[in-house]
Amino acid sequence: MNDVLRPARIVFDDASAPRSLDYDDVYHPRAGAAAQARHVFLGGNQLPARWARRRHFVIVETGFGLGHNFLACWEAWRADPQRCEHLWFVSVEKHPPRRDDLRRAHGDRDVDPSARLLIDAWPPLTPDLHALEFDGGRVSLRLAFGDARHWLPQWMVQADAFMLDGFAPDRNPALWSAELLARLRHLAAPGATAATWSVARAVRDGLESAGFEVARQPGFGAKREMLVARFAPGYALRVPEGRRFGRGGTAAVVGAGLAGAAAADALRRHGVPVTVFEQQAHVAQGASGQRGGLLHGVVHADDGPYARWHRAAFLHAARGFAAGIAQERVVGRLNGLLRRERHLGVAELRQRAHALALPDDYARPLDAGQAVELSAGTAAWPAWLFPTGGWVDPRSAVSAWLGHDNGIELRAPARVNALRRAAGGRWQLLDGQGRVLAEVDHVVLANAHDTQRLAGPLEVALRSVRGQVTMLPADAARLPALPLPLAGDGYVLALRDGDWLCGATHDVDDAHADLRDDDHRRNLDTLSGLLGRQVAIDPARVTGRVAWRLSTPDRLPLVGSLPSHSASVRPDQPRFLPRHDGLHVLAALGSRGLAQSALGGEIVASWISGAPMPVASDTLDAVDVARWSARVARIRNAAS
């Protein structure tokens, strides 16, 4: 597990230069943070000239601080008529400021509009890589909270420019160490530049050892000189086959449920022309066709790969859906969710929250009395409150992602019967008569249970899980008010029209398609357990829906480029396995499709476009579709 995240401790006794108590140093010179950013970090990297007319431009920064360098880049990008199509800014901060401190640092009441947008988007202080989007998704901030020594090896990015910023080398030597600077060579695109206000000998030596040509230029303010550098290593670094990402092209997505729609929307935002093929006449006809689904995070004591993935996925989804709800493009309510902890008391919940240093705006432990108060008397048990959780109508999410005015071509009904490799390495999608439906550079298989028909064996025992939900009309029983969704062993939520949705059953390898009265009774028993009282209702008044979810044994999804075979010199990690060029999958989202689809789609789009990955390298290994092939290869290797 990563070190526990500790927020910044900032003193504002000098309005011109806030001071860090953690490092006993100022965040920026008194001559001005914005002026320093323009002179040192933009000027030293020859910006904005170098991003002119580029499709993508990627900046990596080693210390986010209070965000002044990001805001200066964003301002310069906005003002430049020849700006790149998409600006990516990847940064890390060991001690991130709290939202109120960030607001105070940027003038409190008299806040610049761009700074206000950053403050409004400021994420919970969890040790994750947070993906924030601005200017309609054309400016993307990938912001990692934690130690740069941990995060730089985890980033998957090709940087065009580096901004080496942070507290002075004698106050924070770890950020300027030779080991950390050596990591820059693994992040640098050919011809990448770097700039920093520091001219310390260790910094110069570290950059040169990493393959940079270093020079001095006039500095800013009290600094007589600054350093600029250009990446020219004279050698090529070997990149693992599972980390060789694309550079765009055209794409086809097979499947128009949550997974396919999320992938298509992410590809569109990355500038990749995309066509979606759906074999049904309408979108969201499978498990994505429910009237409502839950959205919440998880809290695990070990904070391992499962917990980190689901936390990152939930935070990513909640940001996107909250914006969609505010714009009335998505139906739902994200004003909180209560998740019951049956086997832990409130003391254990509080101890776990303290040990993980989880912020209250991510997950908050509640005793039974607090849960009763927040749920208007419906929940009388210890629980986690996820303040930004709630429920979303999956059908509205799919429709928003595949909206007719966003440039995505939807073809439905259109069944893809087979895939064929064409001349030049492109992929052809064929119908039942062998006719070519499309020819593209990339195919994304997001067709759930039908994935293996087109992908071939995935070397994993996928499970099909039947789920039946029960819907209760608002007037069908004497039901209490339900201000927040309740979850635990099952769930219940109040839909926008007042009807209640509860469930869901969980039956592996059950192909029965009709609604079953016994399953309604099971769901009503679950509801009674959550409410703490028996729910009496005429079974004839309830309705429901059956759908099947696809899941893996480790309950993590299948994301990424498909492996071409299992044999590998280094089969211990999926990143070393060779891949089918241009063939990708996003499937097996299980019962958490709402929470996982958006981040999964962003990963696939980044894989195809070559944009910075929105997750850590270890997290990508945990969800990589090739992880099962790597396990098979390890077993074969051990047996030989």
Image: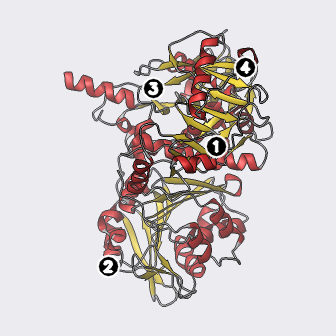
Q: Mark 4 points at which residue?
A: 542
Q: Which mark is residue 411?
A: none
Could you tell me the amino acid type at mark 4? Val
Above or below, 318 relative to 275: below
Q: Do the residues labelled 4 and 3 touch (CB within 8 Å)?
A: no
Closer to the eye: label 1 or 3? 1
- At mark 3, the secondary structure is loop
Give the alpha-carbon distance from disc 1 to disc 3, as whole Å.
37 Å
Residue 528 percent across, percent down from the top left: 60, 28
- At mark 2, the secondary structure is helix
Closer to the eye: label 2 or 1? 1
Asked whether residue 431 is in view, the answer is yes
Above or below, 359 relative to 596: below
Give the alpha-carbon distance from disc 1 to disc 4, as whole Å.
24 Å
Could you tell me the amino acid type at mark 1? Gly
Q: Name the residue under label 2.
A: 201
Q: How crowded is mark 2: few (under 14 residues within 10 Å), some or many (20 or more)?
A: few
Q: Name the residue under label 3.
A: 552
Closer to the eye: label 2 or 4? 4
Give the alpha-carbon distance from disc 4 to disc 3, as whole Å.
32 Å
Q: Which of the colour schemes (rainbow, by chain, secondary structure, one colour) is used?
A: secondary structure
Quadrant of residue 459 within the rendered picture: top left
Could you tell me the amino acid type at mark 2? Arg
Q: Are marks 1 and 3 in contact (CB under 8 Å)?
A: no
Residue under the point 62% across and 72% down: 103
Closer to the eye: label 1 or 4? 1
Mark 2 vs mark 4: which is more N-terminal?
A: 2
Residue 311 percent across, percent down from the top left: 50, 46
Mark 1 vs mark 4: which is more N-terminal?
A: 1
Give the alpha-carbon distance from disc 2 to disc 1, as whole Å.
64 Å
- At mark 4, the secondary structure is loop
